[in-house]
Amino acid sequence: MSYEYRIEYSIQRCPEGTDSFVEIGFGSSGTSGTVDRALYAIQSDVQNRLWEATEGMPDPETVDQRDD
C-alpha cells in the first residue's frame, strides 16, 4: 500500500509589545510520496518566501523588514 502526503501550514507573527499572533501567510507542500519530501517542499517555500498571502497580509518578500 502506498500513501500520498501533504503538509498544510500557517505563518504567524506577533507584533512587538503584544502577545497576539496574527496569520501573515499560509501554504501547502502539495502532494508528495513521503513525509520528508513534503517537508522539503515547505522548507523551500518558506526560505524562498513563496507562501500564499491574501488581502491584508504583507508581501512575503517584505516580512523580515522592520516598520521602524
Image (tube, grey):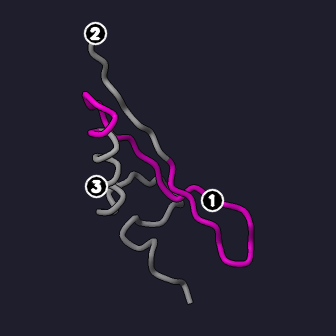
Magenta highlight on residue 25:
yes
Residue visible at 47% across and 55% down? 25
Residue 31's tag is none
Q: Which amino acid does label 2 sit on?
A: Met
Residue position for label 3 = 44
Q: Which amino acid does label 1 sit on?
A: Val
User: Of the residues tagged 2 and 1, which is closer to the observer?
Assistant: 2
Q: Are marks 2 and 3 in contact (CB under 8 Å)?
A: no
User: Of the residues tagged 3 and 1, which is closer to the observer?
Assistant: 3
- Between disc 2 and disc 1, whose residue precedes? 2
Residue visible at 53% across and 60% down? 56
Badge 1 density bin: few <14, some 14–19, many ≥20, Cα 10 Å = few
Rounded to the nearest whole Å, what is the CA distance between mark 2 and mark 1?
40 Å
Coordinates of residue 47 in the picture (x, y in percent)? 33, 62
Task: Tell me the magenta residue range.
Answer: 10-37
Quarter holding the C terminus is bottom right
Disc 2, SS:
loop
- Between disc 2 and disc 3, whose residue precedes? 2
Badge 3 density bin: few <14, some 14–19, many ≥20, Cα 10 Å = few
